[in-house]
Image: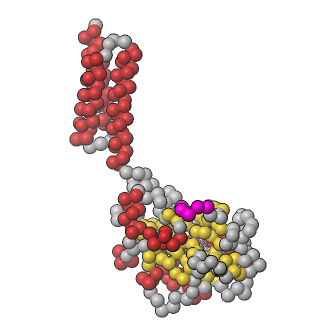
Amino acid sequence: MKKLNKFVLKSLVLLFAFSIAVSCGESKSNQKVLFDKIVSKAGKTVSEIDKTASEIDKAVSEINQVASEANQSSSKTSGTSVAEGNYDGLEIPVYTRGTLSETIRKRYSYTVSYNHEMKNPNWVAWTISAEHASGKVQRMAFQDDEDMPDPKGYLSDYYNSGYDRGHMCPAADNKWSEKAMEDCFLITNMCPQDNGLNRGMWNSIEQQCRSWAVKYGKVYVVCGPIYLNQQHRKIGKNKVVVPEAFFKVVLRMGDYPQAIGFICRNQSQKGRKKTDFVNSIDEVERITGYDFFSKLPDNIENKVEAKADINEW
């Protein structure tokens, strides 16, 4: 009976070791290494145990520990969910310099972080897919945002101000849906923007982002205002702050992830080229205080954010 019990137990151990090795999803060579490791641990344990249930439980517990360590090792080598293609929320930035006045609202096609002190968005983040880079939906009327609590900017603040209601998430990125187009005309998606910039270089960068979406299938975009001065110009009854500059960062994934940033002064840039405004993501982060695309694995994030070459796009 003693020999039979040990034979049964050893058979169970071998079966258990085989099932654990296969379930870890490793290559055949790695499965063999894991199998041998479990059997070695189990073999030592089997030779030392008695017939009592408590000692058998202890042996199984030790074997489970070996399997758990193997699973943890497998998880580390297989990468994170982002590396495997789960990019949900990848475009949402993280502020790294303390607290920030903000109310976050998820719109139909974008997410906005709104600053109640500046009466402008802190940032607006969205994705552009190849399918959504064009469409037939027409522009709509600008509208106040009843969903956003006060204090905030209103349409009336822009009247006779000398500034455009500059979209952060642009209308042309939302032609695929009437609801998306409606949401992008909320005043909380706007900043006071120089007419020449809004209809010139900023528009050119927006067009470039849509072209990249078509070329690569999808891009992740974040943009917003930059305040460089201690004192700012303000417009309207609600004193909406006029930003001194704007940033935009863009990421594409796929086999060869790339990222690029742009910073434009809030003034006409007529006669200049897009390449004049290209910055690395690291540089945009240094100026703005945001950590962009932070859900990327560190090895990918560090690489794509360190340089910016528009010719690689």
Image: magenta residue range: 94-99
15 to the left or right of 164: left
- 303 versus 138 height, above or below: above
Main SS, magenta region, reads loop
Is the image coloured rainbow, by chain, by secondary structure, or in one colour? secondary structure
Q: Is residue 17 visible?
A: yes
Q: Is residue 166 visible?
A: no
Which residue is nearer to you in this view: 128 or 193? Answer: 193
Which residue does the image show at 28% across and 7% down from the upper left?
1
Residue 98 belongs to magenta span: yes
Residue 86 belongs to magenta span: no
Q: Quadrant of residue 165?
A: bottom right
Q: Residue 221: x percent and y percent?
A: 50, 69
Which residue does the image show at 54% across and 62% down from the upper left?
96
Q: Quadrant of residue 187?
A: bottom right
Which residue is nearer to you in this view: 31 or 37? Answer: 37
Location of the C terminus (image quadrant): bottom left
Which residue does the image show at 26% across and 32% down from the upper left?
37
Which residue does the image show at 51% across and 91% down from the upper left?
270
Which residue is nearer to you in this view: 241 or 275? Answer: 241
- 242 versus 117 height, above or below: below
Q: Quadrant of residue 258?
A: bottom left
202 to the left or right of 215: right
Q: Residue 193: x percent and y percent?
A: 61, 82
